[in-house]
Image (cartoon, helix red, strand yellow):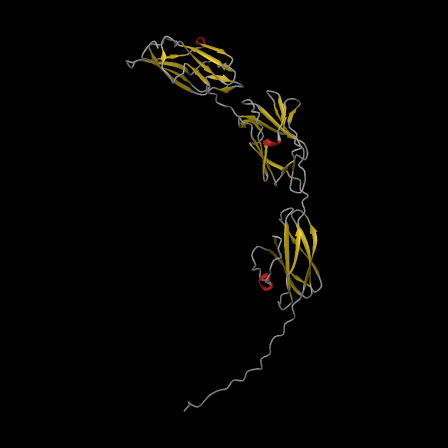
Amino acid sequence: MLGGLHACTEFDEYNSITVGSAPSVEITPGIVADSTLTVNITNSGDGYVTAGIKMSDGTAPEVDSEAFVKQNLGGYVYVTRDVTKGETAIFSFKGLTQDQAYVVVAVGTNADGVPSNAATLEVTTSDSHVPSLTATDPSPSLDPELGADGVLKLMFDEPVVFDETKAIDFWYMFSDVSFTLHADSVEVSGSTVTLKPGTFPLNREIVFVSWEEGTFTDMTGNMTAAQESGLEDGRYPFGLYYRVVQKLFAPVTVVPDSANEVSFVDFQSIELTYEEIVKSTSSMEGVTITYNDENGDITTKVVTSDMVTINGTLIVIDLPLPAMEGQVIELGMEEGAFSIGNSNPSAAVSIKWDVVGIL
């Protein structure tokens, strides 16, 4: 019978593992530049050091050393290295923001992994970078892309400040108008500067923009270079130059007023007044006058150059047929039928008049 049989196992005596005491670390600044910095870290024992960096909010961070060496604290960029007792190890951090305060934290461990208390260092990157113009809106070009109001946006590679004692100069080439932009016409928002000349350029004008050195600075006072623009050898544009868009010109006044009935006695011609000087096109195509009488009969006549008189900003179109009571007379003009100002097209026009008897 086996019921009373049992076995005994003899265990070795348990011995606890002895670990070394926690080391200490020291951290001192190394080389500080615009986008990089180094720190010097010394560990009092053999082991490794974990260093991390993040932007500073001005308050000393609370650091759990064990969580830090496991890289479990958010917001840091970490670097870990093996170190020898007493060795000064150099830790490097790149891709930083210029003129920005950072906090660097270091925790060392001994060979057994026991962490030290955290050592911290506040350091601010330098700013030796001169702000650079990276783009404009629109881009410099002889294609007509600058708006009729002449507003131009400048984009720099960092936030800038406008020095109101400096000059931003505009030159309108065709009209030969030069002026310095008033400080109220310069708007700065971060790294974007908006220039609002106020003096509207002619349509299809070529605009040049220049400024002197230091017109814009970054937040630490680094000055932009001078911007020169103009014509090389009197012919070739360089620097910042822009062509103003074409504007479609509609008549500012029409006689007779189409909002009112017009007597056939008084309706012998149509007068259109524009903002700028009018020039006829060579073909005079696309201008018609249509007569629709009360019987529904429709007659369309093409307007020829002998029916048109141009005087400055005024166009006078003689009716090809006499107006009759009961008719609806319509003037139709295709876009570009006339050239306005600096080779800008006239807008398409469709205007109707109700013709009545003697008023």
| Side of 143 where 320 appears, left or right | left
Q: Position of residue 102 (x, y in %)?
A: 63, 52
**Figure check: 19 above or below 13:** above
Q: Position of residue 182 (x, y in %)?
A: 62, 29
Q: Tell me where residue 232 sits by quadrant.
A: top right
**Figure check: 334 above or below 85:** above
| Residue beneath the point at 60% across and 63% down | 65
**Figure check: 250 above or below 45:** above
Q: Is 219 in front, or is 50?
A: 219
Q: Tell me where residue 64 sits by quadrant.
A: bottom right
Number of marks drawn: 0
Q: Residue furthest left?
A: 295
Q: Residue furthest front?
A: 359
Quadrant housing the N terminus: bottom left
Q: Position of residue 52 (x, y in %)?
A: 62, 56
Quadrant housing the C terminus: top left
**Figure check: 109 above or below 307:** below
| Side of 24 where 357 appears, left or right | left
| Side of 358 where 65 appears, left or right | right
Q: Is 295 in front, or is 161?
A: 161
